């Protein structure tokens, strides 16, 4: 059980003839952990916790970003891309990254 956000982005290509739809999903898994599914349908579990703080709303633990399918290995650059997408999609949340 959790809260699911579907974020759909409409992007026009360079010719403005076609519109590409990119869909990302974020599911908050209770007070901790987030399931993030990118536009390719690949899901990741992100270690996180809600905070009771004026400065931050949530913390992300970069060492705890794991693909649901363990065959997909992540390096630090991959994790930064995932965090960047998450930040772009949740602009109202103040994140602390550890």
Image (spheres, helix red, strand yellow):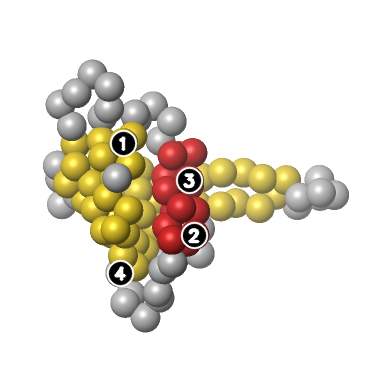
The structure residue drawn at horizontal position 76% and vertical position 50%, both measured from the top left corner, is 13
Residue hosting label 2 = 77
When the figure is inspected, residue 9 is found, relative to residue 52, above or below; the finding is below
> Who's the residue at 23% across and 47% down the image?
48
Left or right of 63, for residue 49: left
Q: Say whether disc 4 or disc 3 marks the residue closer to the N-terminus.
A: 4
Question: Which quarter of the picture shows residue 7?
Answer: top left
Residue in the image at 26% along x and 58% along y: 64
Please say if 76 is above or below 70.
above
Q: Which of marks 4 and 1 is nearer the N terminus?
A: 4
Question: How many C-alpha atoms fall within 10 Å of the one at disc 4: few (<14), some, or many (≥20)?
Answer: some
- Asked if residue 73 can be seen in this view, the reply is yes
Which residue position is annotated with label 4?
Answer: 68
Q: Is residue 24 visible?
A: no
Q: Earlier in the sequence, mark 4 or mark 2?
A: 4
Q: How far apart are marks 3 and 1 (CA)?
A: 13 Å
Q: Marks 2 and 4: in contact by CB < 8 Å?
A: no
Marks 4 and 1 sit apart, C-alpha to C-alpha, by: 23 Å
């Amino acid at each position: 059980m959790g809260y699911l956000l579907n974020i759909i982005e409409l992007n026009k290509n360079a010719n403005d003839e076609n519109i590409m739809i990119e869909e990302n999903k974020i599911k908050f898994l209770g007070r901790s952990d987030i399931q993030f599914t990118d536009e390719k349908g690949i899901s990741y579990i992100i270690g996180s916790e809600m905070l009771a703080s004026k400065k931050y709303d949530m913390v992300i633990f970069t060492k705890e970003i794991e693909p649901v399918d363990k065959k997909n290995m992540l390096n630090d650059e991959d994790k930064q891309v995932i965090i960047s997408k998450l930040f772009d999609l949740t602009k109202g949340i103040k994140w602390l990254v550890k």
